[in-house]
Image (cartoon, grey):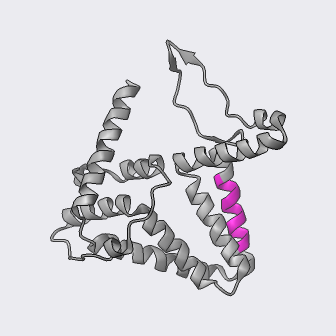
Amino acid sequence: MDWSSVTAEDLVDALREVDWSTPPRPVSEFFSRFTAPRSYSKWTSRLKCNLYYYRTNYFILVMFILGMGFLRKPVAILASLATGLSIAFLNDSFAVTFNEKVTRTVRQFSPHLAAKMRPPIMPVIRGRPSKRRSIHICGRPRWVFVLLFSAVSCMLWLTSCSFLTVLWALLIGLLVTLLHASFRTPNLKARLNTFREEFRAVWRNYSEL
């Protein structure tokens, strides 16, 4: 896959649509081989490739740094979890899976309430939806839960420690991610994985025509 032609918007869309349950890459592979990029174009291509391929590892790494930075403050750990959930809700696969599990659990106690939590039915024209189906969680648009958990995490961060400390911890996590993605040499598995995802994206766009 030619990552030099992939824009930042395309990368964000790919991270949003990819399956969230992908397990993290092994630690031995994650810290296998590091080399300096030879040019700016090589660096940007490597950065996009690694951010996509090691997405789960980077997410766990950032959450780990935030959690370790506030290990003695339980409220800050709860804030880290709320922050992680607000980010995870941006992923389509995670949001749909979370909604299905919550609805299935509620259905065991109140089928009537579970029926209200279903997403709205999109009108169909000529056998196809009139517009792209939006993601709903518990019958509400996804952005409601993203904003809700973001607000809760901000309140917990402010009550547990100084906001400057949170920014420093988050900055360290993002800096470590950037350094790793910049110097980790993409291996053959990463290239094959991105080729497979590129085929899926092309097939998905073809099926929507």
Magenta segment: does it hold 153?
yes
Where residue 146 appears, x then y in whole percent? 64, 54
The number of numbered badges drawn on the structure is 0
The furthest residue to the front: 108
Horizontally, is 64 left or right of 47 in the view?
Answer: right
Where residue 181 appears, x then y in whole percent? 33, 70
The furthest residue to the bottom: 72
Is 198 situated above or below 174? above
Is 20 situated above or below 202? below
Where residue 66 appears, x then y in whole percent? 57, 77
| Residue drawn at x 65%, y 43% as measured from the top left | 100
| Residue drawn at x 30%, y 44% as measured from the top left | 198
Magenta segment: does it hold 9?
no
The furthest residue to the left: 38
Is 191 situated above or below 202? below
The furthest residue to the top: 126
Q: Which residues are magenta?
A: 146-156
Where's the C terminus, which quadrant?
A: top left
Picture quadrant where residue 136 is located:
top right
Where residue 104 appears, x then y in whole percent? 71, 42
Q: Nearer the viewer, residue 136 or 114?
A: 114
Horizontally, is 69 left or right of 53 in the view?
Answer: right
Q: Nearer the viewer, residue 137 or 47?
A: 137
| Residue drawn at x 59%, y 64% as measured from the top left | 84
Most frequent secondary structure within the magenta stretch: helix
| Residue drawn at x 66%, y 61% as measured from the top left | 150
